[in-house]
Image: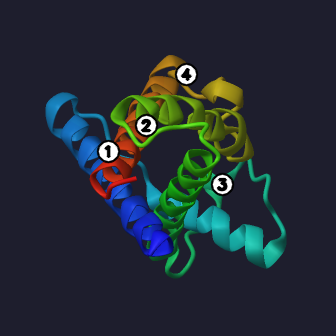
Amino acid sequence: MDIMHIIIIGILSCIAMDFWQRLLKLMINVSPSDWSVVGRWFILSITKGKVYNPNIDNESPLKNELLIGWIVHYSVAILYSLVFFILYKYEVLNASYVDGIIFGLISVVVPWFFFMPILGKGFLASKTPAPFMACSLAVGSHVVIGLAIGLCFQIFGY
């Protein structure tokens, strides 16, 4: 049953992040993440072995890139849920909103030091027009994901 909970919690946490991003769009007109770029990156990584792609925004759109981007997005959230579960099992984290927030804050290293750089945005979004804003948005999204994961594990009785 744990694997089913991990998947469900990953999906629910991703929905929470997507809701958060839509709320930011409504409140302060900040566009949500563009999952077509993630899909394009994933397709090119698999088919051409091109993991580092600093010009991803200039690559031609690919068939089904948006759908694949969404699948990658939700798969990563499920992976985060799995990592949280493992840390819970090894008694590093508790199933709580506080540990969820801590997990979310720690997980922001993934976009800051992996995903942004491989897409040509630089470490900590240093090559973007507004690095502080990009990093802040990543923190917000990851706190929401972590909070949702921690709460969901608590609700499911872990």
State how far apart marks 4 and 2 are (Cα).
25 Å
- Seen in the picture, residue 63 relative to 33 is either above or below; the reply is below
SS of the residue at dot 4?
A: helix
**Left or right: 144, with 125 as reference point:** left
Q: Which residue is mark 1?
A: 151
Q: Earlier in the sequence, mark 2 or mark 1?
A: 2
Q: Amino acid at mark 1?
A: Leu
The answer to whether marks 2 and 1 mark residues whose Cβ atoms lie closer than 8 Å is yes
Residue 11 lies in what quarter of the image?
A: bottom left
Secondary structure at badge 3 equals helix
The circle on residue 131 is: 4
Disc 1 secondary structure class: helix
Separation of residues labelled 4 and 3 (CA atoms): 18 Å
- The crowding category of the residue bearing disc 4, from other C-alpha atoms within 10 Å (few below 14, some 14 to 19, many at least 20), is some
Residue under circle 2? 100
* Of the two numbered discs 4 and 3 in the rendering, the one whose residue sits closer to the viewer: 4
Question: Which of the two labelled residues, at mark 3 and mark 2, occupies the earlier sequence position?
Answer: 3
Camera-near label (4 vs 2) is: 2
Q: Residues within 10 Å of mark 3 (few under 14, many from 20)?
A: some
Relative depth, front residue between 75 and 111: 75
Q: In terms of sequence position, does the residue under pointer 4 or pointer 2 come before the other?
A: 2
